[in-house]
Image: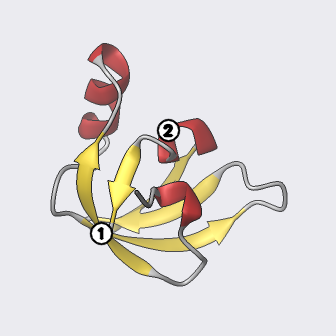
Amino acid sequence: MKTLKDVKIGATVKVVKLHGEGAIKRRIMDMGITKNTEIYVRKVAPLGDPIEIYIRGYELTLRKADAEMIEVI
């Protein structure tokens, strides 16, 4: 299983599944990260947290813990 946390800078991936439960999963979905959405990884901070992505026409910054819950291909 490959998660968004494992994706290299400059890569574009597609969301397969969201892990997590309840409010955490709902918050990720509210940010526009849903199944079959393409995500482009723009930047990763020096220590790996946070991760800056481009999705649905806007830039979004995610914590590493949230990125681990997003399964991609």
Residue 32 in sight in this render: no
Amino acid type, callout 2: Asp
From the viewer's perspective, tell me whether residue 37 is left or right of residue 25.
Answer: left
Q: Nearer the viewer, residue 1 or 50?
A: 1
Which quarter of the rendering shows the C terminus? bottom left
Mark 2, Cα crowd under 10 Å, few <14 / some 14-19 / many 20+, is many
Residue at 61 percent of width and 56 percent of height: 51
- Distance from Cα at disc 1 to Cα at disc 2: 20 Å
Q: Earlier in the sequence, mark 1 or mark 2?
A: 1
Comparing labels 1 and 2, the label whose residue is closer to the camera: 2
Residue 19 in the image: above or below residue 6 = above
Q: Residues within 10 Å of mark 1 (few under 14, many from 20)?
A: few
Circle number at residue 66: 2
Q: What residue sits 76% from the left and 60% below the top?
A: 45
Residue lying at 47% horizontally and 58% vertically, measured from the top left:
4
Is 45 displayed left or right of 62 in the figure? right
User: In what quadrant of the picture does the N terminus appear?
Assistant: bottom left
Q: Position of residue 20 (x, y in %)?
A: 35, 27
**Residue 32 image offset from top left, x and y in percent:** 25, 48
Element marked by disc 2: helix
The percent coordinates of residue 24 (x first, y second) are 38, 23
Q: Give the label on residue 57, or none.
A: 1
Which image quadrant is residue 25 in?
Answer: top left
